[in-house]
Amino acid sequence: MHLHKLAFMKISILILVFALSFQLASAQNQWFKLYEDSASLVNDGKAITAAFTKDIQKIKPTLTFNINTRLNTTPYLIFYWGENGERTANLPKWDQVIEPQKQFFYQVAGSEAAGKDMFRLFFNGFYLPHELGHALEHITKGNLKGSYQEEYFANTVGMLWWKKQGKSKELKDCYEFAKKVWAKLPNPIPAGSTIEEFFTANYQKASEDPFVYGYMQFKQFIQLYEDKSLPDFDTYIKLYLK
């Protein structure tokens, strides 16, 4: 009787593992696309968040990392929220984005089609584990103040996690887009200041201007993509959590 129960439990666990693996594979195959269906966007986002969470908890099982991923299109587009008892990763949907922001995408990307490509690659693509990186820093270090270094950490986490998932093609597509867009953006850094100093001192104001904020974000993405000295995701997180 006990052997039958044990066998049943093992089979049940294997089925659950297979189901979760299938869900993640399906989500990742659909991700980096322009979502038309809200439920699919949220379900895929939740699957990716669950996979990220599993990777973090493998490294540090005692860490409580519980982030709710939801659809919440605002002018911030994709963002982590960790106040008032909430810990959420907020996803945007293209048809809910306000028109001025759509025009920004069209302008810097070069066309309407390219603007939509830019949105799917970054905001329905790369930036979800970036936001989960913010969540990780918030949970482990306390309140986030908004700084160049916080963004650099989140971008590093996002870059390394997607590499771990084998998304080299998608990252290369993001890289080519980032280079093209960044070259068009005016340099907002005043003479005598560094990019780190400027964005840390003016983070809130900079984050409200897509041209200024985009300059920093795409610059960081380019630097990280080209940095061949970065460790793998697990090594990086282990060092961070020491």
Image (cartoon, helix red, strand yellow):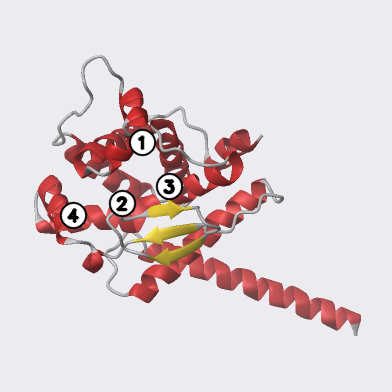
Judging by the rendered image, the residue that carries numbered circle 3 is 130
Judging by the rendered image, the residue that carries numbered circle 1 is 225
First-in-chain label (4 vs 3): 4
- Point out the frontmost of discs 1 and 2: 2
Spot the residue most to the bottom. Answer: 1
| Cα–Cα gap, marks 3 and 1 | 14 Å
- Point out the frontmost of discs 1 and 4: 4
Name the quadrant containing residue 121.
Answer: bottom left
Secondary structure state at the residue bearing disc 3: helix
- Badge 3: few (under 14), some or many (20 or more) residues near its Cα, within 10 Å? many
Judging by the rendered image, the residue that carries numbered circle 2 is 122
- The x and y percentages for residue 175 are 28, 41
- Residue 118 to residue 220: above or below: below
- Badge 4: few (under 14), some or many (20 or more) residues near its Cα, within 10 Å? some
First-in-chain label (3 vs 1): 3
Q: Are marks 2 and 3 in contact (CB under 8 Å)?
A: no
Spot the residue most to the right. Answer: 1
- The reply to whether residue 128 is in sight is no
| Cα–Cα gap, marks 2 and 3 | 10 Å
Front residue of this view, candidates 93 and 58 = 93
First-in-chain label (2 vs 4): 4
Judging by the rendered image, the residue that carries numbered circle 4 is 101
| Cα–Cα gap, marks 1 and 2 | 14 Å
- Residue 228 to residue 151: above or below: above
